[in-house]
Amino acid sequence: MFIFSRPIEEHEPTLRDEIQAVTTDFESLGAQIFYPKGFMHEKLAIIDRKTLWEGSLNILSQRLSKEMMRRITDDGLVAETISYLGIDKKLLEAYKPTGSTRLSFCQVVQILFYEMVFPSIKWSIFAVSQIMIVLLKGFLAVFNIVGIILR
């Protein structure tokens, strides 16, 4: 995984510690971080040169605002984007496959947690809260009907 970002010192001072922590986490998982010259405002992710995520979301520094990303799976558009950003050569220079692509136990646990366990827990909490809301609205409706009947 290659991440292109502005240098930490170009980010808002209040976000620098968080951005540093996130980039350190990505580097520990094997990502390579690049800091292109010139002000960078793009918000995108390119996965396997096949999938492009683009939008207003600041991927490495998202806070509580409502943002969006659009997923595009179009090899031609992804290639155009890579070319437009001028990162094709940088990716070729940086891509040096290692002898082993095996993940460490800690990396596997991190991937499982962040990609499977955490989203499942988050979805479950959301689903249960929605069910509780429906049940409470149902009880309220029953109480209202009983109140009308007893008047």
Image (cartoon, rainbow, N blue to C red):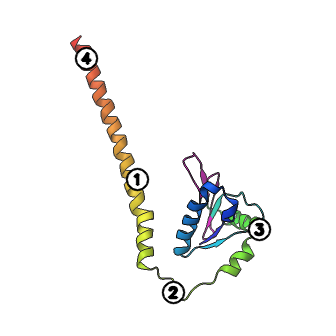
Which element type, helix, strand or loop, lies under badge 2?
Answer: loop
Stretch in magenta: 46-72
> Which residue is label 2 attached to?
100
> Which residue is label 4 attached to?
147
Q: Which quadrant is home to the N terminus?
A: bottom right
| Residue 99 image point, x, y percent | 54, 89
Q: Is residue 96 above or below residue 20?
A: below
Name the residue type under label 2. Ser
Mark 1 or mark 3, earlier in chain: 3
Mark 4 or mark 2, earlier in chain: 2
Return the mark for residue 37: 3
Q: Residue at x 74, y 76 (%)?
A: 89
Q: Nearer the viewer, mark 3 or mark 4?
A: 3
Name the residue type under label 3. Lys
Name the residue type under label 4. Gly
**1 and 2 marks in contact (CB < 8 Å):** no
* Distance in Å between CA atoms under marks 4 and 2: 71 Å
Q: Which quadrant is home to the C terminus?
A: top left
* Distance in Å between CA atoms under marks 3 and 2: 32 Å
Mark 1 or mark 2, earlier in chain: 2
Which is more toward the observer, 129 or 19? 19
Can residue 55 be found in the magenta stretch?
Answer: yes
User: Does 40 sit left or right of 20 as displayed?
Assistant: right
Q: Nearer the viewer, mark 1 or mark 3?
A: 3
Which is more toward the observer, 101 or 52? 101
